[in-house]
Image (cartoon, rainbow, N blue to C red):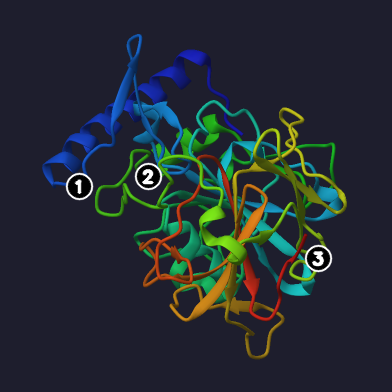
Amino acid sequence: MKRYGKRALATMFSAVLVAVTLLTMTAKAEELPAEPESVMVGDVEYVRSVYTNEWVPKEQTGIRPIAVMMPTDKSAQPSYGISNAKILYEIMEEGEISRQMAVIDNWVGLPKIGNIRSCRLYYIPEATEWDPILIHFGGVFYMMHRITAPDINNLSGVAEYGTGGKAPGSGYFFRTSDRKAPHNAYISAEGIIAASAQLGYNLAIRPEYYNAKHFRFAQSVNTLEQYGAGAIPAKNIDLSKIFTYTKSSFVYNEAEGVYYKFIHGKPQTDGLNGEQLTFSNIIIQNTKWATLNGSKYLTFLNCDNTMDGFYMTKGKCIHITWSKSSDYEVTHYYDDFGNEIELNEGKTYIAVAQAGRVPLMN
């Protein structure tokens, strides 16, 4: 991995901010959705985050997120940088083992991100929803036409679809000696910036894909009490029927108003800071799926409008439906009255579940 000094890294980051400024001006010229309400704290302007609705520095919102493929394997825990994920997807793969995709907006400055694993085709519609730089370590042959499309900006440690293709940015990944392959591949923010500069990837939001409105957030705290008996208790959420290997689960902390995540029966933590992952919102998205003919690989119908799921927050759960029309369109979630659900401020976990598999709650 090529190393850069602080001055060189600062220069690269300055270039990112210049690009962000220019593209923000372009976005305004093209009459993208208006900026959310802002506040000044000293000399820093803050706006609401698209991901969490929290107040964040405005300059941060102009930088594209990264979407990092991370394993759930027991021997691969903990992941590094995963607590920075504002949106965390978990989807089943072959062999009854799931994988995670961490959408991270505040990645600049992270020294170690990963470990990083391979991608599957059905992660791409989830990723493009956020227009990120997709970071993975190879993939499988059936995603070759999508991963190599001009609109996709990806970094891959090996051939990008497993049996061939380029390995964009591979020289900026690195391996550690504390774990055995394949669980020891990482990248840093420094490496992402350098690789993107080499490949001509724009680190600023792309106006032609950028969507300033994603989730609908509640103006105050959404307790789900408005649904009466339709909101059932969900202080303990067990996903062992959905993810049979990881047995992902959540426990609600009433004092903090968030769910703590567990994996393999233990707290799921971040190797960078030791923090256990927490989420304000949990979405279970039941999805049509199949096994690809002649292979062990799965496929999911990510763009659909006929399926349902569940939304959990503040120790309660309601039934929902969802719709997504195309890759770059956002996924919308609705209650049983047809109203778009209002998420609470904070991070969101999304389980794309095989239809027929449901959570256990109490």
Q: Which residue is drawn at 16% across and 40% down?
A: 28
In the picture of the structure, the residue carrying the numbered disc 2 is 201
- The nearer-to-camera label among 2 and 1 is 1
Q: Which residue is drawn at 34% across and 28% down?
A: 58
Chain-order first, disc 3 or disc 1: 1
Q: Where is residue 274 drawn, in percent x and y?
A: 77, 30
Based on the displayed image, in which of its 4 quarters is residue 48 positioned?
A: top left
Mark pair 2, 1: CA separation: 22 Å
- The nearer-to-camera label among 3 and 1 is 3
Mark pair 2, 3: CA separation: 39 Å
Chain-order first, disc 2 or disc 3: 2
Q: In this view, does 40 lie above or below 286?
A: above
In the picture of the structure, the residue carrying the numbered disc 1 is 32
In the picture of the structure, the residue carrying the numbered disc 3 is 240
Mark pair 3, 1: CA separation: 42 Å
Q: Which amino acid does label 3 sit on?
A: Ser
